[in-house]
Amino acid sequence: MKDYMKPYDYDMENYEACLATRDFWDDCGHEWTYKTLDEKLVILGGFVQRGGNLRRVIKRYAEDRSEIYRCRIHWVIFTYIWRMIMGDEPMSNFNPMSKRIKCLDNDELIKLLSEELKKCVKEICGTRYNRFGEHEIYNYWIVSNEYQYDDTALDKIERKHWRSHPDEPITVFWDKEKRWERMYCLF
């Protein structure tokens, strides 16, 4: 674990511009490898915790991109959510959590990502010796594993969905997962 991970220290307009890049939303591009998954989550978490709007960031990223780039956005969001809810457990299409996440619409998916970032990305205070051999206190950020397998945010979003769509048959809801099998763009 890197003990120097921290969110960007930018004003919100520049922060948003830095996030609306392939580094954060295209897992097939070479830019994706510049930062670890946890580093990206810390940077995104810092943005959300300061009141940033991920929906606007994603819209900004997607608006001038071809479908080739936009078709990876929902998979990247899924990867971020999976890391925070399931930790290092390998992704599986057969896991019930995977199926539940894939049934969310785009706005619900972004909402779940925001809620998980607020809950799982934390600032920690630590101590270390500096180069002069003196003990010093410093702050760093982590993606906490204390909320692994905690689906309360997902539960809340699903319940809100059912309240606002009371006539939607369960089969229609569960069929939404099939959108992910096709290779087209959800965003």
Image: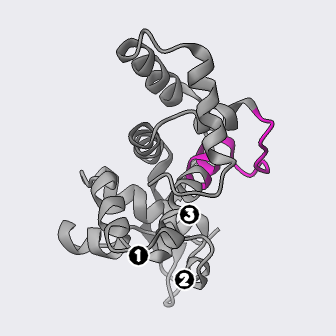
Left/right placement of residue 149 relative to residue 136 reads right
Q: Amino acid at mark 2?
A: Glu
Q: Which labelled disc corresponds to residue 62?
A: none
Q: Is residue 112 left or right of residue 53?
A: right
Q: Callout 2: few (<14), some (14-19), or many (20+) C-alpha neighbours within 10 Å?
A: some
Q: Residue at x 60, y 70 (%)?
A: 27
Residue that mark 1 sits on = 21
CA gap between label 2 and label 1 equals: 9 Å
Q: In the image, is residue 72 part of the stretch drawn in magenta?
A: no
Measure how far apart labels 3 and 2 are at the Cα level. Answer: 13 Å
Local secondary structure at mark 3: loop
Q: Nearer the viewer, mark 1 or mark 3?
A: 3
Q: For mark 2, what is the residue?
A: 31
The quadrant where residue 156 appears = top left
| Closer to the eye: label 3 or 2 | 3
Is 14 situated above or below 160?
below
> Residue shown at 42%/65% (left/top)?
43
Task: Count how many numbered circles sit on residues in the image.
Answer: 3
N-terminal label among 3 and 2: 2
Amino acid at the residue labelled 3: Arg
The answer for how far apart the CA atoms under marks 1 and 3 are is 12 Å
Residue 20, by quadrant, is bottom left
The answer to whether residue 94 is magenta is yes
Residue with the mark numbered 3: 72
Q: Could you say where residue 118 lies in the image, as x and y percent from the top left?
A: 40, 44
Q: Secondary structure at mark 2?
A: helix
What segment is highlighted magenta in the picture? 79-95
Labelled pair 2, 1 in contact (Cβ < 8 Å): yes
Tell me the quarter of the picture where residue 143 sits: bottom right
